[in-house]
């Protein structure tokens, strides 16, 4: 365990002045764009749902048992869309692309998310075919094999700039990691819920803390960006314990995820938890209780982590007890601003949301470096921010003994632009990515690393080639010599 928490790490961050940029702000609310937050972070997230299949370990106590993808209800919006497509990945991708285009969102940069169950527990042939069909749908052409599909996507109209796989910690072996790399995956979300073995046993989770530790380590060493799903109020926990476990996630070198989704526990029809609720053995948090816990979690979240989501979208007809407000995040953020609470997590600070809210944005940008230890390596979180801590872009560099320097993520924030589109009021395509890459390369070089590699989405490889990188012999990473 580390003795210093994330707050102390942030105080010791190095601030490096850099070139100043001028950004003309715009109010996104005035634009003829439906659901602007869909692409406000720089990419278009496109979720593809898996067909229903029970988890091999059985069902967790809080998980409903319906003819629907595991942990979802038959009427969940994503399930309805997928079912209408017969769970065919090609049809699902095409339908979502059409929907994005109908809402006037650019669809050049797609973040593909495979969700709806433990994908890595499905038959291997199914996994391989499913991923290939997703690429084929983006490409608009059927390829001979997965490698050809990926190669086509490098210059396709709809490029997969990131591929996310949702899985369980116990379905993240070395072989699983190898497969995900071969698919072109760049991000993995782990169903962690709570790092407590007694809780895992109580809810029939089917794995232990050590599985979370092992999965996190394997993924970081391979270069993946890592997300955790956490569940405040899970049976066996309480408000005090929820906060203690959250603190441990960022104080222990065994964890430290890059992203988190917070899903307060709800009682759903068809779950084992329903019987406990009616028997008086379990009471979920009220909205007020959960909101205060989430606010404390946001206050504890370090600068290098992004709180991706708060609350799941559960249809009211399937909710027995628990919070019904799927837009609880909006209320929480309004409360945070009213109480003038300092929040460091990434999403709260993004330039795109500052523009959406019509805030005046100072455009003098500097680089801030947060350095921390995790899973046997040293992480350098390099962010481009202004004096008000508004975030314009970031890069994650990992230095690990006996491995090349690894860039796990490069992201420039702001409303999505089309590929090769010249920036006007927006922040993308202004050279900030090149500046962040140069700083990461400089750090790696000074630390004695001769090689650097990037875990790149298939659709972003062309960008790195322009920066002098080449696809490695295994066609996994893009890399170059630093000497």
Image (cartoon, helix red, strand yellow):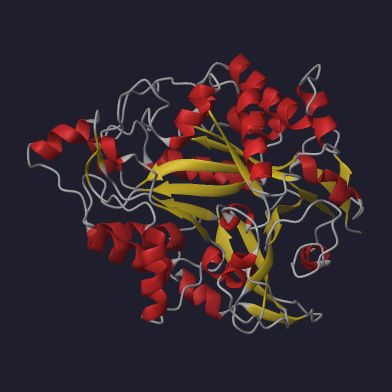
Residue 358 spot, x, y in % from top left: 59, 75
The picture quadrant where one finds residue 144 is top right
Q: Which quadrant is home to the C terminus?
A: bottom right
Residue 172 located left or right of residue 369: left
The picture quadrant where one finds residue 278 is top left
Q: Residue at x 59, y 20 (%)?
A: 88
Front residue of 229 and 254? 229
Residue 405 located left or right of residue 74: right
Q: Is residue 473 visible?
A: yes
Residue 346 located left or right of residue 76: right
Q: Which quadrant is home to the N terminus?
A: bottom left
Residue 260 spot, x, y in % from top left: 47, 53
Q: Residue at x 36, y 67 (%)?
A: 295
Front residue of 126 and 333? 333
Q: Is residue 50 visible?
A: no
Image vertical order of residue 229 relative to residue 95, above or below: below
Q: Residue at x 30, y 30 (%)?
A: 64
């Amino acid at each position: 365990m580390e003795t210093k928490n994330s707050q102390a790490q942030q105080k010791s961050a190095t601030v490096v002045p850099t070139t100043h940029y001028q950004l003309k702000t715009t109010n996104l609310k005035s634009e003829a764009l439906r659901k602007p937050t869909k692409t406000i972070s720089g990419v278009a997230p496109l979720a593809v749902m898996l067909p229903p299949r029970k988890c091999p370990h059985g069902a967790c106590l809080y998980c409903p048992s319906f003819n629907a993808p595991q942990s979802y209800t038959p009427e969940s919006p994503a399930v309805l869309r997928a079912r209408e497509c017969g769970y065919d990945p090609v049809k699902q991708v095409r339908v979502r692309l059409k929907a994005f285009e109908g809402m006037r969102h650019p669809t050049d940069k797609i973040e593909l998310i495979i969700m709806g169950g433990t994908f890595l527990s499905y038959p291997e042939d199914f996994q391989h075919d499913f991923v290939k069909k997703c690429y084929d749908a983006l490409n608009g052409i059927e390829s001979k094999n997965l490698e050809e599909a990926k190669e086509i996507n490098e210059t396709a109209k709809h490029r997969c700039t990131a591929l996310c796989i949702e899985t369980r910690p116990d379905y993240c072996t070395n072989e699983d990691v190898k497969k995900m790399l071969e698919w072109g995956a760049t991000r993995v979300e782990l169903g962690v819920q709570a790092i407590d073995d007694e809780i895992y046993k109580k809810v029939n989770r089917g794995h232990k803390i050590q599985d979370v530790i092992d999965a996190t380590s394997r993924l970081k060493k391979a270069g993946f960006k890592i997300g955790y799903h956490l569940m405040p109020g899970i049976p066996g926990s309480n408000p005090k314990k929820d906060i203690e476990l959250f603190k441990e996630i960022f104080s222990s070198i065994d964890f430290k995820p890059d992203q988190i989704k917070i899903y307060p526990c709800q009682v759903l029809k068809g779950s084992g938890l329903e019987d406990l609720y009616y028997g008086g053995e379990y009471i979920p948090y009220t909205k007020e209780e959960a909101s205060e816990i989430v606010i404390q979690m946001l206050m504890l979240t370090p600068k290098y982590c992004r709180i991706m989501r708060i609350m799941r979208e559960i249809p009211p007809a399937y909710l027995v007890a628990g919070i019904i407000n799927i837009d609880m995040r909006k209320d929480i953020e309004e409360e945070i601003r009213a109480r003038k609470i300092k929040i460091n997590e990434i999403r709260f600070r993004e330039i795109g949301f500052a523009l959406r809210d019509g805030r005046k944005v100072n455009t003098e940008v500097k680089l801030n470096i947060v350095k921390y230890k995790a899973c046997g390596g040293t992480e350098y979180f390099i962010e481009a921010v202004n004096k008000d801590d508004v975030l314009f872009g970031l890069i994650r560099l990992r230095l690990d003994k006996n491995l090349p320097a690894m860039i796990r993520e490069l992201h420039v924030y702001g409303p999505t632009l089309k590929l090769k589109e010249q920036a006007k009021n927006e922040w993308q395509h202004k050279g900030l990515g090149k500046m962040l890459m140069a700083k990461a390369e400089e750090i790696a070089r000074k630390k004695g690393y001769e090689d650097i590699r990037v875990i790149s989405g298939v659709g972003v490889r062309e960008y790195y080639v322009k920066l002098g990188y080449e696809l490695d012999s295994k066609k996994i990473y893009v890399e170059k010599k630093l000497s």
